[in-house]
Image (cartoon, rainbow, N blue to C red):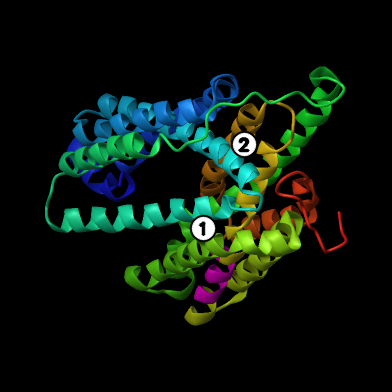
Amino acid sequence: MWVVHIPSIEHRVGISHSTLGSLLLFLAVGAIAGMQLSGPLADRYGSRRMVVLAGSGLAAATLGPGFAVTTWQLGAALAVFGFANGALDVSMNSQAVEAEQLYGRPIMSAFHGMFSVGGVLGSLIGFGTLAASLPPYVTLACSSAVGFVAVAAFSRPLLPHRAIDPPVGGESSSHGRFSSRVLALGALAFMLMLAEGVANDWSALQVKEQLGASNAVAALSFGAFSATMTVGRFTADRISARVGPVAVVRVGALISAVGMLTVVTSGLLPLTLAGWALFGAGLSGCIPQIFTTAGNLGSGSAGTNMSRVVGMGYVGFLAGPAVIGWITTVVSLTTAMLVPLMCVLVAAGFAGVVRRGGPTTDRDHTGSS
């Protein structure tokens, strides 16, 4: 809902694109801060409590951008908005890991699929209210109300806090091992979310520049990417249950590589759109596997581990589009797409880091590490 109102809010506040880009850094910094704070708090007080607090905070923060009328008001509103969003991102993924542990089979990708559906519905509603000439503060105020109702209605079934015993041998004896594993998972998340961020921000422009397509036709590339990403998230759990998370990440990253290679080399619109669709399909199941592994390390700090992995991934999501922008000062946008191609290839090579045991056991039938 926020994203579809960016142009109208930018016009109302009276700022340039460059100023808006700077203000979006407030949102990013706030999000990363919220992620790093909510993880340890979820470990101490439970992810359920943090979901309620962060969800309520996000519902309230949604009002800020809608009512901001000056540059600094918008910057402050985005910082708070990002903080609450980041806190909710980590705490709800921590809660999802606990639910998956009790469920006994992979379900994390389905949660991310619902996240995608929410994004699509929010965009459609936002476009509809804009077409009806409703001011942003009205729509965002309604979104805020819906958020509060959702928190009140769905907080009771969330899982209560449960203490997790440290691993055998003591927490301190395993601290280094868990820290290196978290770093490896974070690096994997960084590469894959960097690739996803590039698709979000540059797919339409790549098609327009490379093929000379109109804005409407070029937008189909992001539509193809988003559609296969959403569908893939609802099918990845069953695939993970059969072949294991390592295979999901490795094969998924390779499928994405094929898709991006098609985008880079194709001169035909249907083939380029197919490439972006493959790119989304391959990425769809990867991130949920990483988050689940981070939450099942058994270190007694699931929320903290999650916050670090999600935080590193989010940095990649933000850095990817910026890196592509810098590279385009030297080469074409299509050539710059070699960056996400290399990222997914490296991710395929290091997919073994998501191997895990426990309730969502890794049934990796590939025979590789």
Viewer-nearest residue: 131 or 357: 357
Q: Within the magenta stretch, is there residue 109? A: no
Please tell me which residue is depicted at 33% across the width and 40% down the height of the picture.
Answer: 150
Magenta stretch? Answer: 273-280
Q: Disc count in the image?
A: 2
Whether residue 298 is visible to the viewer of this picture, yes or no, is yes
Answer with left or right where residue 31 lies relative to residue 133. right
Q: Quadrant of the C terminus?
A: bottom right
Label 2, secondary structure: give it. Answer: helix
Residue 88 x, y percent position in the rendering? 46, 34
Residue 184 sits in which quadrant?
Answer: top right
Residue 309 x, y percent position in the rendering? 64, 36
Answer with left or right where residue 143 lies relative to residue 56. left
Answer with left or right where residue 308 lies relative to residue 269. right
Residue 366 x, y percent position in the rendering? 83, 64
Check disc 2 and report the residue beneath it.
Answer: 312
Crowd around label 2: few <14 · some 14–19 · many ≥20 (10 Å)? many
Q: Which mark is residue 275?
A: none
Spatial CA span between label 1 and label 2: 18 Å
The amino acid type of the residue labelled 2 equals Met
Q: Earlier in the sequence, mark 1 or mark 2?
A: 1
Q: Within the magenta stretch, is there residue 274? A: yes
Please tell me which residue is depicted at 47% across the width and 27% down the height of the picture.
Answer: 50
Cβ atoms under marks 1 and 2 closer than 8 Å: no
Whether residue 328 is visible to the viewer of this picture, yes or no, is no
Which numbered disc, 1 or 2, marks the residue closer to the eye?
Answer: 2
The amino acid type of the residue labelled 1 equals Ala
Please tell me which residue is depicted at 72% across the width and 55% down the height of the picture.
Answer: 245
Q: Which mark is residue 199?
A: 1
Residue 365 sits in which quadrant?
Answer: bottom right
Label 1, secondary structure: give it. Answer: helix
